Image (spheres, helix red, strand yellow):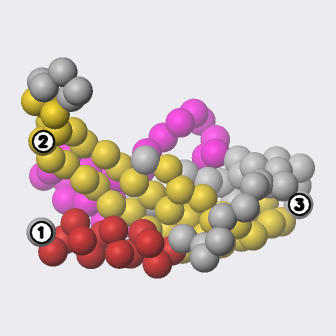
Amino acid sequence: MRRPLAALLLLAAALPLRVRAQDASEPLPIPGGFHFFAPGPPRLGYRGLNVEASTITNFSGDVALAYLVGRARSAAGESFVLGADMRVFRGEYVAADGVTRRGAFGFV
C-alpha cells in the first residue's frame, strides 16, 4: 500500500499549483513513432534502469513515473486486470515552432 501512495504523492508534487489552458506550441514526441521507454527490471519485461523516461524530444527537466497494476470492475460487474503507465513532466522543451518553452504535462 505504501508504494502506490508514494507514487501518487510524487506525481502530485510534480504538478503545477494552478492549471491553465495551453497557449504555446506543444512539445514534439521522440522521433520514430510513439514509444514508451519503460525503466525497470528486465526480468519483469522492462528495459533496465538506464533508459530515457521522457517521451518528449529536446526535453530537459523532471520526469515522475508510476506503474499501477491491480484489479478493476466494469459498470457491468465484470472483473479484469488493469495496468497503467502514468508520467508527469516538468521542465524546458523545444516546441514544434522551434521556441524553447517551459511547461508541465502528464498522461495516463
Total marks drawn?
3
Q: Disc 3 to disc 2, how far (Cα)?
A: 43 Å
Q: Neighbour class for label 2 at 10 Å: few (<14), some, many (≥20)?
A: few
Extent of the magenta region: 29-50
Give the residue at mark 1: 1
Q: Neighbour class for label 3 at 10 Å: few (<14), some, many (≥20)?
A: few
The reply to whether the magenta stretch includes residue 8 is no
Q: Amino acid at mark 1?
A: Met
Give the residue at mark 3: 99
Q: Is residue 17 above or below residue 57?
A: below
Q: Tell whether 12 sits left or right of 57.
A: left
Spot occupied by residue 2 in the image (x, y as percentages of width and height): 15, 74
Q: Tell whether 53 sits left or right of 77.
A: right
The answer to which of 67 and 12 lies nearer the viewer is 12
What secondary structure is found at the residue carrying circle 3?
Answer: loop
Q: Amino acid at mark 3?
A: Val
The answer to which of 87 and 42 lies nearer the viewer is 87
Q: Tell whether 71 sits left or right of 106.
A: left
Residue under the image location 24 percent in, 71 percent down: 5
Q: Which-is-in-front pick, marks 3 and 2? A: 2
What secondary structure is found at the residue carrying circle 2?
Answer: strand
Q: Which-is-in-front pick, marks 1 and 3? A: 1
Q: Residue furthest top?
A: 76
Contact, mark 3 vs mark 2 (Cβ under 8 Å): no
Residue under the image location 75 percent in, 70 percent down: 102
Which numbered marker is on residue 71?
2
Q: Quick one: label 1 or label 3, which is nearer the N terminus?
A: 1
Spot occupied by residue 67 in the image (x, y as percentages of width and height): 28, 55
